[in-house]
Image: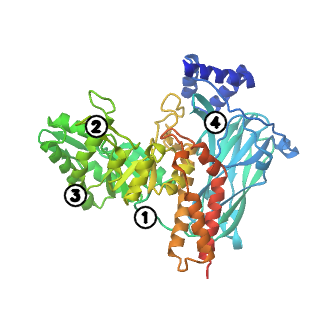
Amino acid sequence: MKKNILVLLAVCFAAALFGQEDLEKKAMDIYRVDMPKDSVTTLKLMKRTGKAYEIFKELSGKFIPSPGDKERGYGLFEMNINDDIYPNFVPSINMLKGAITCAAVPGEKRIAALGVYPLEDISKIKAMAGDLTGPEGKVISGQSISVNAVKYDYDREGISWICKGKYAVPSDEAVCLKETPRLFYLIISVPEGAVPGKYKGAISLSGGKKASEMGLELNVLPVKFETFPDEYYFGSFNYYDFGSKDVNTLEKILMELKERGMNIMHGKINSALKFTPAGVEIDFTNIEKNAQLLKKYGHKRWIIEMTGLPNDIVDAMGCKYYDQRFNKAYKDMLVQIKERMQKGGWPEIQIMIDEPREIDTDNARPRARTYWDLENLFPLHAAAGLPALPSYERDDGGPRFEDNTKRALYWQQGSKTPMIMTHGISLSEKLTRETLKNGNMVYLYNDGYGRYQFGLQVFQFSAKGHVQFWYFSGDRFNTMAQFPVNYAVILSKEGPYIPTLRWLRSSEGVNDFRYIWTLLKRTESASNKTAPEVVAASRYLESIKSFAFGNDNGDVREADTVGEETLKKYGGEKLDKMREKLASLIIAIDNMK
């Protein structure tokens, strides 16, 4: 009842601001332009059944067009990629620039955003990137710059559905509606051999009253990234079955991951496993093909999830949990996988254990049993020599399964294992701290796609990387009817992957981490630790690492943002400023005599 009242109040508030009819018309106009017909039909149906509302952010301001804006029919502005774009957003005066400016390292992919503010409806506006010319006439081809039109969709924020820019489709043209800003995400692939210096060019626009240009300036920095060790990884969970013969789908996934700078793949092997009363059989035919494909795309590690597997073993073999027959079958499975991995030169496998018995007949989410399950599974992994990667989302546990008079604490168990996965938020603060104190490794997961989560947060928590649920949502743009906010990409019916803006920001986060890691390694290898440049670098790294765990209330898998305290320090343009500072300190150390 309370939720319904809040939704009604939000709708009434929005109606008061815009007028309900105007609000619904603008919302549906945007949706008709950006979404497939079946998604528009879905939204209409949800509106009729009271499951969908159009709520716009309360934004103020009025766009004052210049004579040049009136002449071409639109204004041009630079948008920071960390900031969301809404249909009623009005660019501020400081965003109305003659050029988009950014910096990058050779080999880096840098994202920038060009905004168009239409003064009237424009049936098609086209944005094309030209060549960038730099020092001594060196050129970065316009073909190294992909233009991606941003589509609007609805996303859940609290109890409301908010219309905002969500997907970056590989298209250099889009329909523009009057006073509804349109973004183009520019992904600049800086060549490995690019000569450092400033490069200038332009984005050409056509389709309005008059053709125009927005300048594009790229500063290629004289920096070479340090390579972080193989134990570091960044990526997303995907329930691809490595026992499947559908290698085409896997290759598309791997191409998308590589494009975004990610280096880990997650999946399962259920279809290749067969448990019988006699034990376990594994068909490695398709697993071998998929493993070689992982190698092809440079993966050094991969995660195989075994959630729910203990149930399958007990059901198929007629044994009891962790009796002699169970343990033999489970260990035999691990040994077979490890031997085949070594023989085939596969990427190193980690077996992810997340709620081993995810569903029991008498308990849909048997968390109290998880502690006992892991106690029994860890020795089997140790004996087989194949690492377990357990996930813990909180410090506490619950009554022990085998003796409910005693309590099982996850932080005590997890902090003693060689590696764990956790959310890294206040719920698992003690687990994170104790794991690191014991010299073990922490990986973050389910903290949300985003630049902060994939970059600076990893450093602040001394983690070895970040992996996030979920990866793709099928072949439909409209996620309102599905799992509303989690997906990184969709697989369109035509075939290519369409990334969300959050996924693209995640790749920028990985690059943030590369800058941090590079400066860290430079300070460690400097021969003179007391040099002013080295001292300044060390102090800056300490300043960005200092972080109060309790101040971050980023919500596990559904978070698009992080806690308010974090955003005060690291929102909007502040991450760009951090990267500029990191780069300047790297250059200062490199130039030391």
Q: Badge 3 local density, few (<14 within 10 Å), some, or many (20+)?
A: few
Looking at this view, name the residue that lies furthest to the front: 405
Residue 326 % position (x, y): 16, 42
Q: Give the residue drawn at x 67%, y 40%.
A: 85
Q: Quadrant of the C terminus?
A: bottom right
Judged by depth in the image, the label closer to the viewer, 2 or 3, is 2
Q: Which mark is residue 229?
A: 1
Q: Amino acid at mark 2?
A: Arg
Q: For the image shown, how many numbered marks are present on the structure?
A: 4
Q: Earlier in the sequence, mark 1 or mark 2?
A: 1
Q: Which mark is residue 339?
A: 3
Residue that mark 2 sits on? 369
Q: Which mark is residue 340?
A: none
Give whichever of 404, 353 is nearer the camera.
404
Residue 115 % position (x, y): 71, 45
- Res 194 seen here: no
Residue that mark 4 sits on? 164
Q: Give the alpha-carbon distance from disc 3 to disc 4, as whole Å.
A: 49 Å
Q: Give the residue drawn at x 48%, y 32%.
A: 483
